[in-house]
Amino acid sequence: MKNVLILGANGQISQWAIKGLATDKGVSQTLLVRNPKKLGDTPSNAKVIIGNVLDKTLLLRAVQGQHIVYANLTGEDLDVQAKSVIAAMKAAGVKRLVFRPLRSASMTRCQASSAIGTTPSSVKISNLSAALRMRSRRLIFSTPSCARPG
């Protein structure tokens, strides 16, 4: 069983991911939302956590036991949110992240790989379904490569 934490689960892209994983018997979803009224129907393989990624205690509890974190985040404080997610992942020993910022984030995958304790060469650009199929423990990041300035 793969445990997947979906941050920003009310977002349109997250909704596609949730629906895509809803029938996968090998996946258990944890959906972190700020407003559960916007979520709609929750699949049988999902549980809902109400809160914000900036709540460090809540986020750490949500990340523990997960195999992969899918972060679909937005906001003026996107860099702060990204750092919060990576800190919780590092504390919980989770090393697989699909990060889909809805705005341009200044945190590069080079900075993310450093924060989570892996090398930039192990950072793959991927998507959630590909990440679930991966056997290795890698950080998956969708922002620019380390060759670009951060």
Image (cartoon, rainbow, N blue to C red):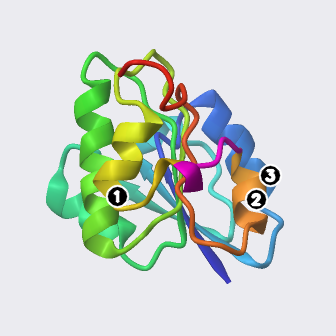
Q: Position of residue 29 (x, y in %)?
A: 59, 65
Amino acid tagged 2: Leu
Is residue 34 in view from this perspective? no
**SS at mark 2?**
helix
Q: What residue sits 54% from the left and 30% below the top?
A: 145
What's the magenta region? 121-126
The percent position of residue 122, horizontal first and vertical second, equals: 57, 56
Q: Amino acid at mark 1?
A: Ile
Magenta region includes residue 6: no
Judged by depth in the image, the label closer to the viewer, 1 or 3, is 1
**Would you name the residue on which mark 1 appears?**
116
- Residue 74's x, y, as percent? 41, 24
- Residue at point 80%, 51% (across, down): 20
Q: Nearer the viewer, residue 93 or 108?
A: 108
Q: Residue 132's quadrant in the figure? A: bottom right
Residue visible at 48% across and 73% down in the picture = 66
40, above or below 57, in the image: above
Determine whether label 2 and label 3 are within 8 Å by CB.
yes
User: What residue would you read off at disc 3?
Assistant: 20
Judging by the rendered image, the residue that carries numbered circle 2 is 21
Q: Quadrant of the N terminus?
A: bottom right
The amino acid beneath tag 3 is: Gly
CA distance separating discs 1 and 3: 28 Å
Considering only vertical position in the picture, is 147 above or below 31?
A: above
In screen coordinates, is 50 left or right of 23? left
